[in-house]
Image (spheres, rainbow, N blue to C red):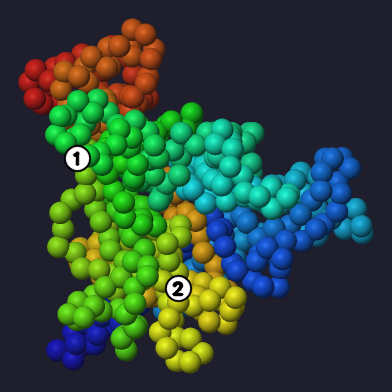
């Protein structure tokens, strides 16, 4: 009996050790900010020199790809990954490796203030140029040059191709984008601005019964986006006016977005969370969206208990746990104790010491909505986009026969497959699902169409 008890105890210890290891997570992300008064722009930038071969000035900047560790107890300081070392390309007052110099300097263009996403190993970043100033100090207001889109190798950080410039009416600003591992499509919560409403609404006589009704569409909408041409396809009009700061999709294909909860006047309780006058959790709230209809799903979730600022933040899921969303956000909503001990808005001028822009890693339970702060992030780093290392490309599991990825297998899939076989047009087709006969080589041909037709007729694979 004693031996059995000892064995059970040993197994329990081993299980606990395994569980602790299983909690380890490495996050990678696209740098957004690390405010530091020691530098003119609030972030690190080092002038290296003029590269005559490249014909450009080379800088080492804070932008780029980063990694951050969570070991179940502590959150590590984010570090550049891959690392940038000046000695690798500059020594003795001259450039020794022009390719590496250009690679390091290109990170000054890795802005993602309007969203980012990884698909097929390519990181797409969207920068809103309204946040840029001209040399004379005026803001960029040219609507035809509103968004700068760039493609990067998600592992090496290499810039792929030229910058694409898109106009304001392409509506590329989002609370975030994510790949749905169920259908392989990219979804986002995009801010729709002054686009015309669809005929289904404009032709509704009740719509204009409201004297204030407008024929344009403005607000957040669930959309899919074609990353090749950066064209969004609205699933809903711009229905939602919340201050959304994140968007993420879990391994089950469920989509979630979080509001900022900013401006909350409540003082945090002893547990660090914010409660309303009724003792209920306050602050940011997690909403779930139906990706088919684009509509919010009614829920009974509570608020997270933390308020954050109305600024772009990052969130993601680990494929191993669809119920925990990891959120990298601000420590507070811009409120705090002032020098007199009163709870008031914190001034920007003293953010370096008052904690206004401090950041933290949170774990959000999407089943309840409540969050827990895992730890403060050193030096107030913040990512514009974040993913679990090694999970940046969650490929959808093949569902033979579901050619269009709508979750059903029917005659529309047959028509689409036959059209592809006769014309070669693969638009809208999930090729992994087109291998209906499960040919080991992955070939898609007439035998797949035959297998699919037989399935539709018999409701089973032959």
Image point 30% across, 70% down: which residue? Answer: 283
104 vs 419, left or right, is right
Image point 30% across, 11% down: which residue? Answer: 419
Count how many numbered circles sit on residues in the image: 2
188 vs 236, left or right, is right
Q: Residues within 10 Å of mark 1 (few under 14, many from 20)?
A: few
Mark drawn on residue 291: none
Q: How far across and how far down the image is residue 151, in percent?
A: 57, 39
Relative height, residue 27 to residue 236 (above, below): below
Q: Secondary structure at mark 2?
A: loop
* Residue to which mark 2 is pinned: 334
For this orientation, the residue located farthest to the top is: 422
For this orientation, the residue located farthest to the left is: 458
253 vs 25, left or right, is left
Res 426 → quadrant: top left
- Comparing 307 with 385, the one in front is 307
For this orientation, the residue located farthest to the front is: 211
Res 119 → quadrant: top left
Image point 57% across, 51% down: which residue? Answer: 131
Quarter of the image with the N terminus in it: bottom left
Image point 15% across, 29% down: which residue? Answer: 205
Relative height, residue 460 to residue 5 (above, below): above
Label whose residue precedes the other's in the sequence (1 or 2): 1
Q: Secondary structure at mark 1?
A: loop
Could you tell me if residue 130 is visible in this image? yes
Judged by depth in the image, the label closer to the viewer, 1 or 2, is 1
Q: How far across and how far down the image is residue 401, in percent?
A: 22, 26
């Amino acid at each position: 009996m004693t031996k059995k008890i000892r064995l059970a105890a040993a197994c329990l210890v081993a299980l606990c050790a395994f569980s602790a290891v299983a909690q380890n997570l490495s996050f990678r992300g696209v740098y957004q900010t690390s405010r530091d008064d020691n530098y003119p722009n609030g972030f690190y930038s080092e002038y290296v020199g003029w590269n005559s071969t490249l014909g450009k000035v080379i800088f080492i900047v804070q932008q780029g790809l980063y990694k951050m560790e969570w070991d179940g107890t502590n959150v590590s300081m984010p570090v550049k990954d891959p690392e940038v070392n000046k000695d690798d390309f500059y020594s003795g007052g001259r450039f020794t490796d022009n390719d590496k110099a250009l690679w390091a300097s290109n990170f000054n263009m890795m802005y993602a203030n309007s969203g980012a996403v990884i698909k097929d190993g390519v990181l797409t970043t969207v920068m809103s140029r309204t946040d840029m100033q001209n040399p004379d100090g005026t803001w960029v207001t040219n609507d035809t040059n509103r968004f700068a889109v760039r493609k990067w190798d998600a592992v090496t950080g290499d810039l792929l191709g030229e910058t694409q410039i898109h106009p304001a009416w392409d509506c590329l600003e989002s609370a975030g984008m994510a790949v749905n591992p169920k259908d392989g499509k990219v979804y986002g919560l995009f801010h729709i601005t002054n686009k015309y409403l669809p005929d289904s609404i404009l032709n509704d006589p009740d719509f204009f019964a409201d004297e204030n009704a407008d024929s344009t569409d403005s607000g957040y909408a669930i959309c899919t986006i074609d990353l090749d041409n950066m064209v969004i396809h609205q699933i809903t009009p711009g229905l939602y006016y919340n201050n959304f700061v994140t968007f993420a999709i879990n391994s089950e294909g469920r989509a979630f977005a979080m509001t900022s909860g900013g401006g909350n006047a409540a003082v945090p309780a002893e547990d660090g969370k914010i409660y309303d006058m009724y003792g209920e959790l306050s602050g940011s709230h997690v909403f779930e969206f139906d990706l088919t209809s684009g509509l919010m799903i009614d829920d009974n979730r509570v608020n997270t208990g933390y308020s954050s600022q109305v600024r772009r933040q990052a969130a993601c899921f680990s494929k191993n746990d669809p119920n925990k969303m990891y959120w990298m956000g601000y420590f507070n909503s811009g409120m705090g104790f002032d020098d007199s001990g009163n709870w008031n808005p914190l001034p920007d001028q003293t953010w370096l010491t008052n904690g206004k822009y401090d950041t933290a890693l949170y774990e959000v339970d999407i089943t309840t909505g409540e969050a827990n702060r895992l730890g403060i992030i050193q030096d107030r780093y913040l990512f514009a986009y974040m993913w679990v290392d090694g999970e940046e490309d969650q490929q959808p599991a093949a569902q033979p026969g579901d050619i269009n990825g709508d979750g059903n297998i029917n005659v529309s899939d047959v028509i689409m497959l036959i059209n592809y076989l006769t014309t070669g047009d693969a638009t809208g087709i999930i090729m992994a699902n087109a291998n209906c006969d499960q040919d080991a080589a992955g070939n898609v041909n007439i035998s797949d169409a035959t297998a699919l037709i037989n399935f539709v007729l018999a409701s089973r694979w032959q």
